[in-house]
Amino acid sequence: MNKRRFKEKLAYSFLIAMISIIVLSICIMFYFIISRGIRVINWEFLTQMPRKAMTAGGIFPAILGTFYLTMGAICFALPLGVSAAIYLNEYAVQNRLVRIVRISINNLAGVPSVVFGLFGLAIFVKFLNFGVSILSGSLTLGILILPTIIRASEEALSAVPNSFREASLALGATKWQTIQKVVLPNSFSGILTGAILSIGRAAGETAPILFTAVTFYSMRLPKSIFSEVQALPYHIYALMTEGTHPESQVAIAYGTALVLVLLVLGLNLIAVILRNQFRRSKKW
Amino acid sequence: MVEKTIENKNDIKMQVKNLNFYYEKNQVLKNINLIIKSNAITAIIGPSGCGKTTFIRTLNRMNDIILGIKIEGDILFNHKNIYDDDIDVVEIRRKIGMVFQKSNPFPKSIFENIAYGLKINNLTVNKGELRERVEVALRDAALWEEVKDRLNTSALDLSGGQQQRLCIARALAVQPKVILFDEPCSALDPFATAKIEELIQELKEKYTIVIVTHNMQQAARASDYTAFLMLGELVEFDITEKIFTNPSQKITEDYITGRFG
């Protein structure tokens, strides 16, 4: 065997080994979470309130809380993010100011999430006096996912061929009519995919809601957007760090983790399906 | 010259006066003057990169959407400069329609493609009228017989030539006065090209037509007037027959006889 062939084989085996390590670690992680979590999961676990200082009962308030927080975040971030993307991609003259805005948005995506938490505490909880609440938490998570939504939307908008815009303008459509009737309908799936992926991101975040929305243990379900809530990621943290019955709490924590992972995986799966459907229907 | 053949001022649909066009630091069009006669076909010919497409896109202000351009001079449409400040550019683009080099139907149904322009311009009052005008536009573009049974299927399922005729129908639907064709047949086979050329001949009855082409035979057989552009300059502008039989410039003759280009 000559040297070239040997090197080829070596490189190939090396890459296979690397990818195996990745796949294996993912499998181990899932096995770990599923095998430990599945034991506590049943219908009661998903639909009941916690009992006996979180050593028994279900995690329904945490599921509901995560649902409220992520829905609130997307309601806030989607219109804002899509509007920003439309402005940046369709209207803005590509000058230095717009470049700075784009860089800032990208940098925002790189800010550690705990910093968003502190910001939310200072602005929403204290300054605007929303208190530790669903509202404060949703707004904080909203800012966190804003860059993702803007970027995904911008990508979706710029994927619409320019010839569509030209055809519309040449028929006497205004710019806004063109955006409304031609550009947005053809970028809808891309924007939606971005939105769903960011819901998954928001659902899993702990730090941004730590100071702004969550409570350790609540006996009641939230009454309004100004109530504090329980949330899945923080519930795991609380179960593992507080309380007096580690044995039963750890089991519940793994159950909670499994619910959270399945939720995020489910959302990502929906996003992938949507994207594939979009690609298939797209013919230009 | 062309001026002589135009007896009546009303025969002039558009007039280009001292047009200069700059893209960033390059001058793309240099002092162009020409007349576009009503109900006639004016062909713009010239080698690649001579500014043909840039020129035709100045006629309905489609270049406005590109950054870094500067335009000097006047383009009169019905004796009014379309670059005046008080001109509504959206209205100009409705009155001066355009068909592009590559057919660009919207990814909608055949019906919706035609109805789009009517809807956005509020040109129809009810659904019956909308259907009627879609049919008229498709008939005028010689496409009706081929698509009348599948108006609700995607326009993207049509053949290339049909798609281009659909784009013509879409332009006709909003009732323009002038239609600009930017190399409409460059992506089509000879059979589809012949159909479109025939169609353009028929359209001349009702519309004023400007067509950019790099195909000399097409200009010769399908136009009334021909403008020869080179390196951004208008070399010669005359009745098509004269350009192709007895051009006044040596360089025009070289080009049309295929010595370069």
Image (cartoon, grey):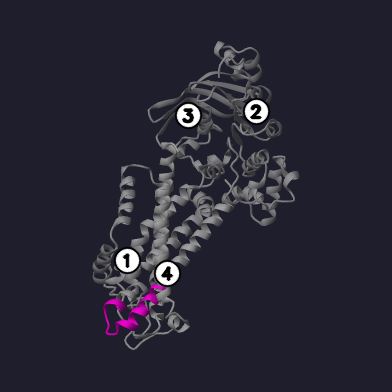
Pointer 2 residue: B40
Q: Which residue is denoted by mark 1 in the rendering?
A: A140
Horizontal and vertical percent position of residue A61: 39, 80
Residue B72, numbered circle: none
Q: In terms of image quadrants, where is residue A2?
A: top left
Which secondary structure class fits the magenta region best? helix
Residue B189: percent from left, percent from top = 67, 32
Chain letter of the residue carrying label 4: A
Distance from label 4 to label 1 (Cα)?
Answer: 33 Å
Q: CA distance from mark 4 to mark 2?
A: 76 Å
Please state if A101 lies on the left or on the right of B35 as rendered. left
Which residue is pictured at 45% across the width and 70% down the height? A262
- Which mark is first along the chain, 2 or 3? 2
For marks 1 and 2, give the one nearer the viewer: 1
Where is residue B140 drawn, in percent x and y?
Answer: 71, 40
- At numbered mark 3, what does the secondary structure look like: helix, strand or loop? strand
Residue under label 4: A31
Marks 1 and 3, how far apart in space?
54 Å
Name the residue located 51 percent from the left edge and 29 percent from the top edge.
B55
Q: Nearer the viewer, mark 3 or mark 2?
A: 2
| Distance CA(mark 1)–CA(mark 2) | 64 Å
Labels 1 and 2 in the same subunit: no
Residue drawn at the location 29% of the way across and 75% of the way down: A132
Dot 1 crowding, Cα within 10 Å, few <14, some 14–19, many 20+: many
Q: Looking at this rendering, what residue extends furthest in the front direction?
A: A1
Tell me the CA gap for discs 3 and 4: 74 Å
Q: Please tell me how many numbered marks the rendered image carries.
A: 4
Q: Quadrant of the C terminus of chain A?
A: top right
Residue to which mark 3 is pinned:
B74
- Discs 3, 2 touching: Cβ within 8 Å: no
Bounds of the magenta segment: A238-263
